[in-house]
Image (tube, rainbow, N blue to C red):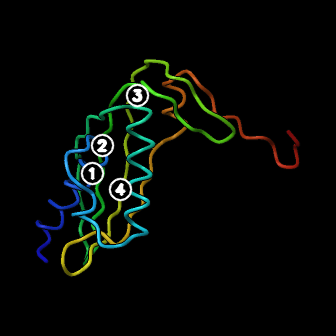
Amino acid sequence: METNELKNRAVKVIDAIAIGQADLHALVASEKALAALEGTRARLRGAFGELDVTVKDQVAEGSVVVTRAKLKGAHVGVLDIPGGHLAPTGNAISTSASIALTFDAAGKVVGFKALYDFPKVLAQMGAQLVIPAAGARS
């Protein structure tokens, strides 16, 4: 599949996660990838509603497309975090994310990874991530 077509498909998948404009089932071939994408969409949409996504750049190599994007939204729902839940604050959030999607020959997603600055997002919501010192007990 052509590089530009894969990049366009990657944007469609990211939009499906952030604002729910597309059916993930039609874009994904792997059950494992579908479960990961649906889980990510449920967590993000549940905590932040619709996110504004701005694609900053994309790199495609073979069947993998990596997209760097800016995510903006507001904390309008409960966010599950390690050790508990964070109630809605209404605070605005803005962070960069890197999303790697692997496609099969038909142009459907078979692999998914995403990274974003979670401590930065927590700080914008007024929360703080506390990591215990090595050997410390809670």
Residue 25 position (above or below residue 127)? below
**Residue that mark 4 sits on:** 99
Residue at horizontal 38 percent and vertical 64 percent from the top: 112
N-terminal of the pair, mark 3 or mark 4, is: 3
Query: Amino acid under label 1?
Result: Ile
Taking the spot 38% from the left edge, 47% from the top edge, the residue there is 41
Nearer-N-terminus badge (2/3): 2
The vertical placement of 116 against 75, above or below, is: below
Q: Which residue is mark 2?
A: 18
Q: Residue at x 27, y 73 (%)?
A: 103
CB atoms at circles 1 and 4 under 8 Å apart? yes
Three-letter amino acid code of the residue under disc 2 = Ala
Mark in the foreground, 1 or 4? 1
Residue that numbered label 3 is attached to: 93
Look at the picture and state if 15 lies above or below 84: below
Q: Secondary structure at mark 3?
A: strand
Camera-near label (4 vs 2) is 2
Q: Which mark is residue 14?
A: 1
Quadrant hosting residue 80: top right
SS at badge 2 = helix
Judge whether 25 appears above or below 75 on screen.
below
- Select label 2 or label 3 by which is in front: 2
Pointers 2 and 1 in contact (CB under 8 A)?
yes
Spatial separation of the CA atoms under disc 2 and disc 1 = 6 Å
Asked if the residues shown at circle 2 and circle 3 are in contact, with their CB atoms under 8 angstroms apart, the answer is no
Q: Residues within 10 Å of mark 2 (few under 14, many from 20)?
A: many
Dot 4: element: strand
Q: Earlier in the sequence, mark 1 or mark 4?
A: 1
